[in-house]
Image (tube, rainbow, N blue to C red):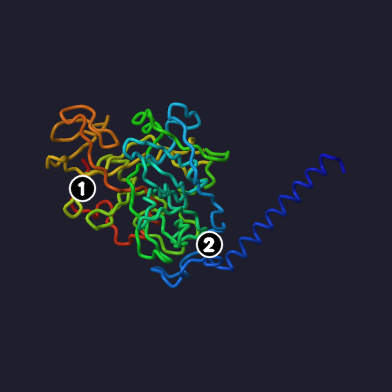
Amino acid sequence: MSQLLRKRAIRLLLAGAIALAAFWWFGNSMMAGPTSGWKTDFSKSIIDLDDVVSGGVPRDGIPPIDNPRFQPVDSVYNLSAVSPVVALNIAGDARAYPLEVLTRHEIVNDIVAGVPVAVTFCPLCNSALVYDRRVDGETLRFGVSGNLLNSDLVMWDDVTESWWQQLTGYAIVGEYTGRRLKFVTSQMISFAVFRERYPLGKVLQGPFGGYGRNPYASYDSSAEPFLFRGRPDDRLHATERVLGAEVAEKPVAYSFSLLRQVRVVNDMVGDVDIVIFWQAGAASALDQTDIDSSRDVGMALMFERQLADGRTLSFYHDGDGFVDNRTGSRWNILGEAYAGPLAGTTLRQRHAATHFWFAWAAFHPATLLDGDAPNRDDG
C-alpha cells in the first residue's frame, strides 16, 4: 500500500471512529435523559419535564462567549452590507453581534455600559433576544444546557443551575422557577444599517474560525422543525418569520409575508398604538451555506405611535421610505425622523423580536396574527 493510500485509510478510520463515538455519546445522552448530571432542584418546575428533549450536545457543548472581543465598526471587512446582526445600544455604547457568530455560540455574556446582558440566539427558532443577567442583585452567567423545549434553547445559570427558556425569559425548572429575566431592547438588522447609524460602534469577533457559514442550510424553508414535538399552528408555514411581541398583555405576531407586501402596519392593541416598519436588505442566517449569499428576508421593528407630546401619528411607505401622515416627516427603520418638521424625534421602540412562527405560536398559542388585530391599518 502506498503512503498516500495509507494516509487516506488512516483518515477514514479516524473519521469512522469519531462518527461512532459521536453516535455512542448521542445515544447514551438521549437514553440518560435531559436531567442527568444536573444539580438543579427538579422539585420546582412550571413545565412537564417529559417535554424537554436533548438537543444532542452536552452542557455548553455549544460554547457561549464569556469574554467577548470587539473591533471598531470601520475596521470590519468580513461582514457584507446584508449580514444580519443583533444591534444593542445602551447609553451610547452601540454593539453589533453578527448572527454568523451567534449561530455557533448561541449566548454571549457581556457587559454593556455597565449593564450585564445575555445576548442570545436560538437558530432552531430564529429567535434573537437580549436579557439583563441580574436576578435579585446576583449577576448570572448563562450557558447552553443542551436541552430543548418546543425546539427552543433552554439556558442554564451558574448560580442555581436553574433552566431558563430562551424565547420567553422565564425560569422553567429549578430554584428560580417562575422568575422572568428583564428584556433589553435590541434590533435584528443588517450590518449596513448598524454601520451607518453607529459609525463609532463595535462589532463582536468570534473566538474561532469558520464564521460566515451556516450550519443549518435550508432550515428556514423546512416544514418540520428539528426536535419539535408539538403540532405547528397551521395559520402560517412553520418557519415563516414573524415579528412577535406582547402588547397590552396580549401576544401579537405580524408575518414577514404580510410586512414584505405593505412595509408599514399601523395598529392598536388594547390601548397601545403601534407601528411596524419593514425594510429589505438583511440576509437570512439560515438559508444558504454562505450566509451573505442567502435570500433577503428583510428586517422589522415595532414602535409606539404616540409622541411624548401626546400626538399620535400614523405612517405610510411612499416607495422610498417611511412617512408620517400628520407632518410629512421622513423616518428610518430605527424609528428616527431624519427630515421634516419632526427631524430629530425618535419613536419609542417596543420590545418585539423576530421568530419562526411555529416557535412563537408554541409559546403563545392565543396570539393575534396579522388580520386578527381589529384596528390594523396597512399605511
Q: Is residue 205 above or below residue 121?
A: above
Q: Is residue 333 left or right of 126 when viewed as pictured? A: left
Label 2 neighbourhood size at 10 Å, few (<14), some (14-19), many (20+)? many
| Kind of residue sitting beneath label 1 | Asp
- Few, some or many residues within 10 Å of mark 1 (<14, 14–19, 20+): many
Q: Amino acid at mark 2?
A: Ser
- Residue drawn at x 35%, y 31% is 198
Res 207 → quadrant:
top right
Left or right of 91 on screen, residue 337: left
* Discs 1/2, front: 2
Compare residues 150 and 147 and report the one nearer the observer: 147
Q: Is residue 316 above or below residue 166?
A: above
The residue at which mark 1 appears reads as 267
**Quarter of the view holding residue 318:** top left
The quadrant the C terminus occupies is: top left
In this view of the protein, can residue 182 be seen by the observer? yes
Image mark for residue 377 = none
User: Above or below — where is 369 with respect to 344?
Assistant: below
**Secondary structure under badge 1?**
strand
Which of 175/150 is in front? 175
Label 1, label 2: how many angstroms apart (C-alpha)?
A: 40 Å
- Marks counted in the figure total 2
Q: Is residue 156 visible?
A: no
- Residue that label 2 marks: 54
From the top left corner, tell me how far across and down residue 276 is, in percent: 26, 43
Q: Quadrant of the N terminus?
A: top right
> Which residue does the image show at 22% across and 32% down from the upper left?
337
Q: Residue at x 45, y 51 (%)?
A: 122
